[in-house]
Amino acid sequence: MQLRTTQRIKGFVTLRPNLLRKLLLSAKRYLIFSFSRGIDMLTINIVGRIVIISETYILLAHEIGAKNTFLPGGHVEYNEGAKSAILRELKEEFNGEGKIDKFIGVIEHSFEHNNQPYYELNLLFSGSLLNYDYPQIPESLESHLKFYWQPIEKLKEVNLLPSPLATVIHNYFKQEKRNSLWISTMENENIR
C-alpha cells in the first residue's frame, strides 16, 4: 500500500515509506555514534515547531544569552501529539493562541550540548497566531526567552537553528505547490 505524506489514519499523519526509512536510518546512525562514545542510552527528542508569518515578518524565539534563534514550539511530551505540543508551548511561552495549518516537513538535527550529543527531529508546521500580529511583539512568560518579528528576507542574519530552516522557510513560502520535505544536518554519510 502506497502512503502519501499527508494521508491520515485515525488522526495520525503518516510518512511515505522512504521518509520513514530515512528517519530510522538516522536514528540507527545516532545510536551507533552514542555507543561508540560510551553513551548507553539513545534519546530521540521530538520537537514541534511552527512557522508564523505576518505580512513579511516571521516570529522567532531567542534564549537570552544564546547566539542563535529558533522557531516557537518545543518538545513533544509523552502521549501528546506534535500539534498539541506546539499549541501548548505557545500558551506556556507567551499566552499565544495559535492555529496550525499545514505540515511542512521534518528537519533532523544533531549537535553537542554540555559535552553531550543531542539528537532531535523537528516536525515543522505552518500556522498563525490568533491574538498577535506584526508589529505586536509577544511578551514572554518565561524569563529566559524573548520573542520578536524578523523580516523573512533577513533570516540568515539571526543564526536560525537548525541551519537549513532559513532556506526551507524562504523556499516553502515562495512555492505554489508545497510538498513536504526531509532535511538532515547529519547526512554526510552515504545512505543506502
Image (spheres, rainbow, N blue to C red):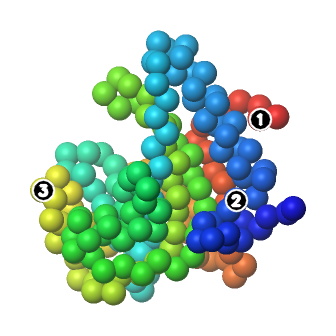
Three-letter amino acid code at the position of disc 3: Ser
Say whether disc 2 or disc 1 marks the residue closer to the N-terminus.
Answer: 2
Residue type at the position of mark 2: Leu
Which of marks 2 and 3 precedes in the sequence? 2
Q: Tell which of 158 and 87 is nearer to you.
A: 87
Q: CA distance from mark 3 to mark 2?
A: 37 Å
Q: Position of residue 185 (x, y in %)?
A: 58, 42
The 10 Å Cα crowd at callout 2, few under 14, some 14 to 19, many 20 or more, is some
Q: Which mark is residue 143?
A: 3
Mark closest to the chain's N terminus, 1 or 3: 3
Distance Cα–Cα, label 2 vs label 1: 18 Å
- Against 170, residue 24 (above or below) is above
- Please indicate, yes or no, whether residue 110 appears anywhere in the rendered image: yes
* Residue of label 1: 191
The residue carrying mark 2 is: 15
Q: In the rendered view, would you say 63 is above or below 187?
A: below
28 in relation to 182, above or below: above
Of residues 49 and 174, the one drawn nearer to the viewer in this rendering: 49
Query: What amino acid is found at the position of numbered circle 1 in the picture?
Result: Ile
Cα–Cα span, label 1 and label 3: 42 Å
Discs 3, 2 touching: Cβ within 8 Å? no
Element carrying mark 3? loop
In percent of the image, x 35 and y 23: which residue is there?
115
User: Mark 2 against mark 1, which lies toward the viewer?
Assistant: 2
How far across and how far down the image is residue 150, in percent?
35, 70
Image quarter of the N terminus:
bottom right
* Snapshot quadrant of residue 94: bottom left
Q: Is residue 134 visible?
A: no
Q: Residues within 10 Å of mark 3 (few under 14, many from 20)?
A: few
- Residue 103: percent from left, percent from top: 58, 70
Q: What SS does tag 2 mark?
A: loop
Front-most of residues 58 and 154? 58
